[in-house]
Image: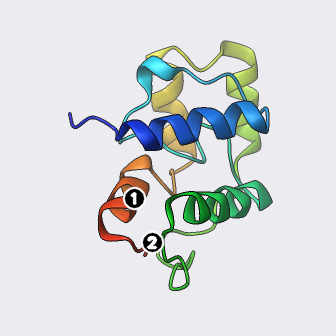
């Protein structure tokens, strides 16, 4: 498994602590981490996250569109599942991913850092 870029990892950690998104499991942060499902950033917050990411890393996000990914809206069932059982257990993550398909992953952000464009 490829490692996440240290600057990107620090950005995500700082963002989550700044906006008090949720407790972040830093040890399990990887390229497969979903921004909307694992970090609970969706709806209007995801637009703010994308804007801050683009501004922080000087990424061209003018051609970015949600048509490719589908706009992340979250899921009431997944939120209830997380509230009841937590999100650290493997079976909870698998069931949550079955109920709600993640839209945007850290891998996309890392490739945007390398190319300079978020597509």
The secondary element bearing badge 2 is classed as loop
Give the residue number, with chain letter if any, for mark 2: 118
Q: Position of residue 115 (x, y in %)?
A: 31, 69
Tell me what residue is drawn at x 51 percent, y 67 percent: 58
Alpha carbons under labels 2 and 1: distance apart: 8 Å
Secondary structure of the residue carrying numbered label 1? helix
> x%, y% of residue 44?
79, 61
Location of residue 3 (image quadrant): top left
Residue lying at 54% horizontally and 20% vertically, measured from the top left? 25
Q: Residues within 10 Å of mark 1 (few under 14, many from 20)?
A: some
Number of residues whose C-alpha sits closer than 10 Å to that of mark 2, classed few (under 14), some (14–19) or many (20 or more) = many
Q: Residue furthest bottom?
A: 63
| Residue at the spot 48% in from the left edge and 69% down from the top edge | 59
Label at residue 108: 1
- The answer to the question of whether label 2 and label 1 lie on touching residues, with beta carbons closer than 8 A, is yes
The spot of residue 98 in percent (x, y) is: 49, 41
- Residue appearing at x 47%, y 76% in the figure: 68
Residue 8 makes an appearance in the image: yes
Q: Is residue 9 left or right of residue 74?
A: left
């Amino acid at each position: 498994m490829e490692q996440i870029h240290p600057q990107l990892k620090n950005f995500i950690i700082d963002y989550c602590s700044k906006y008090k998104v949720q407790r972040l499991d830093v040890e399990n942060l990887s390229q497969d981490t979903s921004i909307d499902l694992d970090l609970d950033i969706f709806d209007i917050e995801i637009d703010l996250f994308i804007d801050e990411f683009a501004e922080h890393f000087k990424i061209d996000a003018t051609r970015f569109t949600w048509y490719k990914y589908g706009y992340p809206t979250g899921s009431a069932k997944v939120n209830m599942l997380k509230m009841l059982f937590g999100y650290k257990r493997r079976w909870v993550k698998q069931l949550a991913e079955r109920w709600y398909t993640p839209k945007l992953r850290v891998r996309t952000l890392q490739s945007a850092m390398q190319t300079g464009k978020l597509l």
